[in-house]
Image: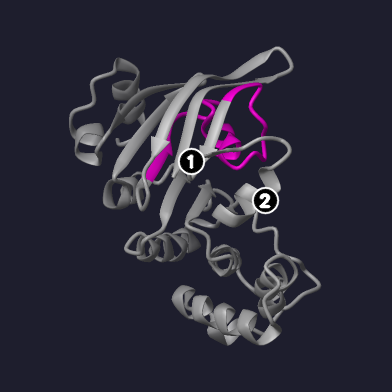
Amino acid sequence: MIKLQNVNKYFGDHHVLKDINLEVAEGEKIVIIGPSGSGKSTTVRCMNFLEEPTSGEVFIEGKQVTAKNKLEVVRNSSAMVFQQFNLYPHMTVLENLTIGPIKLQKKSKKEAEETAYKYLDIVGLREKANVYPSTLSGGQQQRVAIARSLCSETKIILFDEPTSALDPETVQEVLDVMIQLSSMNITMVVVTHEMGFARQVADRVIFMDEGTILEVGTPEHFFDNPTHERTKEFLSKILR
């Protein structure tokens, strides 16, 4: 579903990603972890060309993504959930969920609303359809953002630290929704610091440091028997 081939990314003179090679299979759940500044978020943002690689190739469903075709290819294939919720404050929850399908996918209002209610049920917020985002907690807003990504009905959802901006008490409600999604046939790539989620949901865990992928393995391998010394050092600090 996703292939990164020799991807490099510079911000000015700063070499953020260094020859990243990664393939994600259909339906696979990938969790990317690592210290701050390791290139995790940039890797995910290169997958949908929110950040254009300085060099290297990105493929989605076998089609190379370029600056010219990125809107068409990415819009039809993937959706993204960000650290910040990015909901339109002047629109109700329902309007936030239906504007994309109506304007971009040319769905009727009725069809878009039926889809929206379907996914509001999944995230447990049907009763909030007609309220404004400002009346919701951070956890509820992020669940709405997840529902919005589901409304695009793409095969891939990318998550860029979706719980990092949340109050600790609301983190679990968002993780519970993501755990529920993991049972669906959706390809998920998740950047997170939530190790329990990684252990429970991931098919593979990817550890990054200083712009490179240092270790890839199953959760069992990664948490119980990592091989790279940097991985061991990282886990020793966060799993105390």
Q: Residue 91 lies in what quarter of the image?
A: bottom right
Q: Amino acid at mark 2?
A: Glu
- Mark identifier at residue 107: none
Q: Farthest residue in the top direction?
A: 13
**Percent x, y of residue 46:** 59, 35
Q: Is residue 39 left or right of residue 208?
A: right
Pick the quarter of the image with the C terminus: top left
What is the magenta range? Answer: 30-56
Q: Is residue 163 magenta?
A: no
Q: Farthest residue in the front direction?
A: 63
**Percent x, y of residue 218:** 24, 38
Colour mode?
A: one colour
Q: Is residue 105 above or below residue 228?
A: below
Question: In the image, what residue occupies the spot 36% across and 53% down?
Answer: 27
Q: Is residue 63 above or below residue 55?
A: below
Residue where numbered disc 2 is placed: 72
Residue where numbered disc 1 is placed: 62
Looking at the picture, tell me which residue is in the foreground, 189 or 176: 189
Question: In the image, what residue occupies the spot 61% across and 37% down?
Answer: 65
Classify mark 1: residues with Cα within 10 Å, few (<14), some (14-19) or many (20+).
few
Q: Is residue 232 left or right of residue 54?
A: left
Looking at the picture, tell me which residue is in the foreground, 164 or 215: 215
Mark found first going from the N terminus, 1 or 2? 1
Q: Is residue 47 magenta?
A: yes
